Image (cartoon, rainbow, N blue to C red):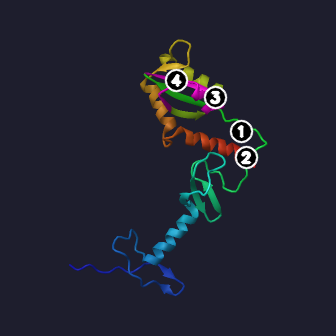
Amino acid sequence: MPSVARRCSGAGAGGSCAGEVPADAPVPLCDRHLALAHDFVDDDSGVVDLAEEPCPACGSRLAVRYPSGRACGVCEWRFGDVVDSELPAPRVDVVYYLRFEGRIKIGTTANPRQRLARLWHDELLAFERGDRQVEHARHVQFAACRLGRSEWFDRSPELEAHVALIAEGQPDPWDAHARWVSAALSLRV
């Protein structure tokens, strides 16, 4: 049975469109109407590309272009906003989860790069936004697998499930940290 050419269901100022629909089109629109729909969606969700210069907040070169301007693809800092270098860096407390051999460390810091550089670890598993109170709550929550009075814990299904939940959708914990710092910076602009 021969295939019947589909006609575009889009409409313009002059009425219905008579354009032919490409065979692989997901919706019954001609190339011109598909392009218009694409541009409409791009205006709302942005187009990902490379930035001409690194993001001043997190250093990423990934950018998202919107009609209103560009934003960092990692931390969402708006390009063109100026970081006031005379102000101290914003304090963003995090609870970190490190793996070293068969153990997991739950600690907290406001300067994770400096803190993690001083600790032996095999892998940074996740960051959770929070301070000493959140850290203490995690120590209590996972007390059954705590090693003495240290911040180290034996791996357990409950602890690993918690870390997986925190890390879900964020394969690189540093991206989450960059977003939190950027959000704190943007409140000062």
Outermost residue, top side: 148
Q: Disc 2 vs disc 1: Cβ atoms closer than 8 Å?
A: yes
Mark 2 or mark 1, which has the lower sequence index? Answer: 1
Label 3 sits on residue: 109
Residue at image coords 76%, 44%: 85
What is the distance, in whole Å, between disc 4 and disc 1 at their CAs? Answer: 26 Å
Question: Which mark lies nearer to you, 2 or 4?
Answer: 4
Specify which label sits upstream in the sequence, 4 or 1.
1
Residue highlighted by disc 4: 120
Q: Given the current orientation, which residue lies at the most extreme left position?
A: 1
Q: In the rendered structure, are the residues bearing label 4 and label 3 in contact, judged by CB atoms less than 8 Å apart? A: no
Q: Badge 3: how crowded within 10 Å, few (<14), some, or many (20+)? A: some
In terms of image quadrants, where is residue 58?
top right
Q: For the magenta stretch, what is the residue range?
A: 102-124
Which residue lies at the image location 43% right of the left edge and 76% below the top edge? 31
Q: Position of residue 74 (x, y in %)?
A: 57, 48
Q: Which amino acid type is shown beneath numbered disc 3?
A: Thr
Secondary-structure class at tag 1: loop
Residue 143 in picture, x, y percent from top left: 52, 18
Q: Disc 1 marks which residue?
A: 90
Work out whether mark 2 precedes mark 4 in sequence or the reverse, and give the earlier one.
4
* Residue 177 appears in view: yes
User: In the shown orientation, is residue 34 left or right of residue 136?
Assistant: left
- Measure how far apart labels 3 and 2 are at the Cα level: 21 Å
Q: In 3D space, how far apart are the residues under numbered discs 3 and 1 (Cα atoms)?
A: 13 Å
Label 1 neighbour load within 10 Å: few <14, some 14-19, many 20+: some
| Residue 116 x, y percent position in the rendering | 57, 28
Q: Which one is nearer the viewer's eye here, 83 or 170?
A: 83
